Amino acid sequence: MRSLNISFTSNLRLIHIMLSKELFKVQRTYINRVETKKTKRPFVHKYEIGDLKTTDIYEFTEDLQKQRTKVTYKGTSSIEDEMNDLTTKSTYTTYNRKYPSFNGKPCEHIAFLKIHKAASSTAQNIFFRYGYTRKLTFVLPKVTKNGYPNVISTITSVKSKNIIPPPINKHYDILCCHVIYNRKAFEAIMPKDTAYIGIVREPSEHIRSIIQYFRPKEIYKRFNSTNPISHFFKNPGSSAKSIYSLVNNRMAFEYNFPRRLFYTKDSDGIKRYLRKLASEFHLVIVVEYFDESVVLMRRILNWSIKDILYVTQNESRKEKKTKLSLEDKRNHREWAILEYALYDFFYKRLWDQIKQEGDDFIEELAFFKSLRKEVTEFCRGPRTKNTNFEIPKSQWSDKFIVNNYDCQLLFKRELSFVMSIRREQYGF
């Protein structure tokens, strides 16, 4: 068997880790700044440890961020004031860095809330690989005549009529197909020690992706103009009246925000529901900081570095990307109160959780970024069934290999994975 050993990169890894200690000083400065000030969140994450390029680790955006409009809830102070107050009082710190509920063992019971157009297929592939290679049981949808094999529901939560019962003498281990969140419904089918993982994406990028992919009728059928998107954002409420609309606070809808909040946007109601979500989710992945999120997830779930490797799934081609103007983004922020409250809250919560992890977190992050790049290059390059990529033991991982089968699973598309899992579990 021919083996490719990456020991030749060991010296480079030492350089990465030495460099990462300097980067961590900047990271800690940023986290402390978030804690003591009402800072604007960074949108751009520009360092690449693997290439030893360290251009301005956390670069605050110009344009929209510098001109960011202070949008207020009905009868309250600004969103930033509300979110800082809310995260300070949140109960999420009950999930401390030791995560005692999993007793130091790898967590094999996962409920992942897969949000449309929020890099959720990339995250889902991590859970698919973990469960599929360990023969765990997935919650799969009953496919109707006009349904999709990867969607349980886009309007309601899990019910006996929309999911296939687990195989005889087995229980569900992993839920990661599209469905609306409902804690009671999830708990009714999942084990008590289930880890709950969510995901959020910066709202203007999220709706841009939705518009590009779904071409919603509220925009393209309603406005017959050269720029229907800008027409829509001038008064989105007049077109997207239904709470089921893909362009009406869709992330909040999939997190099952109380329906009345879509109309009242009541500050106290928003805060209460965010506190509820914070007490129920062990982690909410922030798409713009995906690597940071999955490294934290690895620690929470007691998984290995290999378990969280990924390649980007369902990425749109850059030349075809729909674009929103600064005015479109401002108008969207004024209207999509629930989306920005949700994102801002879990954005800050992620960094608060990372702060609890200690000085070695940024070192592990640097290691993971470099490793993921090398594994991706290996999997994209020429290889045979007998070609292995060998990763030596490190502070964060035992020795392991990435082989041809691992590469196939990393690049396996969502629908193909669902069909493979269905055949494995049910034989059809």
Image: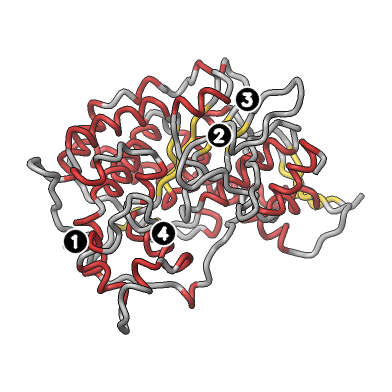
Q: Secondary structure at mark 2?
A: helix
Instruction: Kindly indicate whether the residue at mark 1 contacts the one at mark 2 (C-beta within 8 angstroms).
Output: no
Q: Nearer the viewer, residue 286 or 156?
A: 156
Crowd class of label 1 (few under 14; some 14 to 19; many from 20; radius 10 Å): few
Instruction: Tell which residue pokes out farthest to the bottom in this image.
Output: 226
Near mark 4 (Cα within 10 A), the count class, few <14, some 14-19 or many ≥20, is few
Going by the numbered disc 4, the residue's amino acid type is Lys
> CB under 8 Å between callouts 4 and 1?
no
What residue did someone put label 1 on? Answer: 66
Q: Which residue is mark 3?
A: 106
Q: Residue 371: x, y in percent?
A: 62, 49
Give residue 128's quadrant in the image: top right
Residue 298 tag number? 2
Task: Give the mark, 4 or 2, whose residue is nearer the N terminus.
Answer: 4
Circle nearer the N terminus (2, 1):
1
Pointer 2 or 3: first along the chain: 3
Q: In the rendered image, which residue does mark 4 sit on?
A: 46
